[in-house]
Image: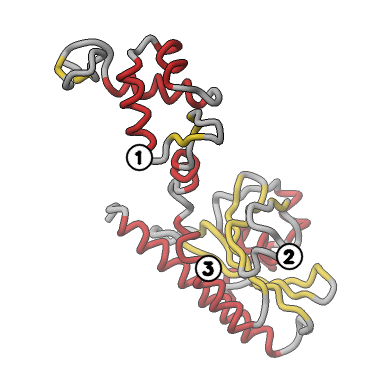
Amino acid sequence: MAVSINDDGGAARVGAGLPALEKTFSVLDKVAQGPISVAKAARLTGISRGSVHRIIKALETKRFVVRDMLGRYVIGPSPAEMSAARVRDPLQHDCDTVLGELRDATGSESCIFRPDELELVCIGSSHPTAALVPVGGRLPPSVDATTQVLIAWSGAFRVSAARMNEIAAPAVLAAVRQLGFAKSAVRPGVVDLSAPVRDHRGEVVAAVTAYVRGVPVSHPAINSFAKQVQIAGSELTDALRRARHRLGHF
């Protein structure tokens, strides 16, 4: 039997009237439709004014509702804060630390990409306010190092056979797998270095990419920077495994 909030102002009792949770949602729904008074909320919901007042006061303590300048009730900040705190991509938990270390090691901007159907999605950047690729940005597959990494290893990223040959010949992808990273110079003055990020099964689920400026692709320093990108990929791989452990999947 349901526990209800009494309309007569008494203590809650079992099995009488509308369930308490349903009443609360009914009141909250009316508040969400615009500024509202207790009296109007009571009239629209059919719940007694005393019960509406108690419900709104309870919601107010948790910041689900607040008063506007005219004293009416409106939706407060808690629903938006709860929405913003939804479960994030596990890679985002550690991306700031790992990308910051990669930036310090290479002096370069870096990003993390996940494959999403036929696009690359940037889920993290070492320079979020001035990024070459903004967080949330989507890129089509191209001849860059990030795409090569995801094509070389990831079963989650698919392109047509013809497009794959345009992006990288089989020999190029074989070299990427052998080296453990990809490099490209498709932007003037910028060398892309990308390495895989693996999940607990060892499958490639993302790529971490550094954008090295002012260093020719043939310069010996590029291989040193590539090693740092590989280290970042390994750290993100470890982070995914830790996240899975935290969630109790082992």
In the picture, the quarter occupied by the C terminus is bottom left
What's the distance in space between the residues labelled 3 and 2, CA to CA? 16 Å
Q: Nearer the viewer, mark 2 or mark 1?
A: 1
Q: Which residue is mark 2?
A: 132
Q: Residue at x 49, y 33 (%)?
A: 75
Say which residue label 3 marks. 96
Amino acid carrying label 3: it is Asp
Kindly identify the residue that appears in the image at 55 percent across and 49 percent down. Answer: 156
Is 161 located above or below residue 142 in the figure?
Answer: above
Quadrant of res 57: top left
Tag 3 near tag 1, CB within 8 Å: no
The answer to whether residue 68 is left or right of residue 218 is: left
Sequence-first disc among 3 and 2: 3
Looking at the image, the residue that sits furthest to the bottom is 220
What is the x, y in percent for residue 2?
A: 20, 17
* Foreground residue among 58 and 144: 58
Give coordinates of residue 140: x percent, y percent. Answer: 73, 51
Separation (CA) of disc 2 from disc 1: 43 Å
Is 113 located above or below residue 110 in the figure?
above
Q: Earlier in the sequence, mark 2 or mark 1?
A: 1
Pick out the residue farthest to the front.
70
Residue identifier under label 1 = 61
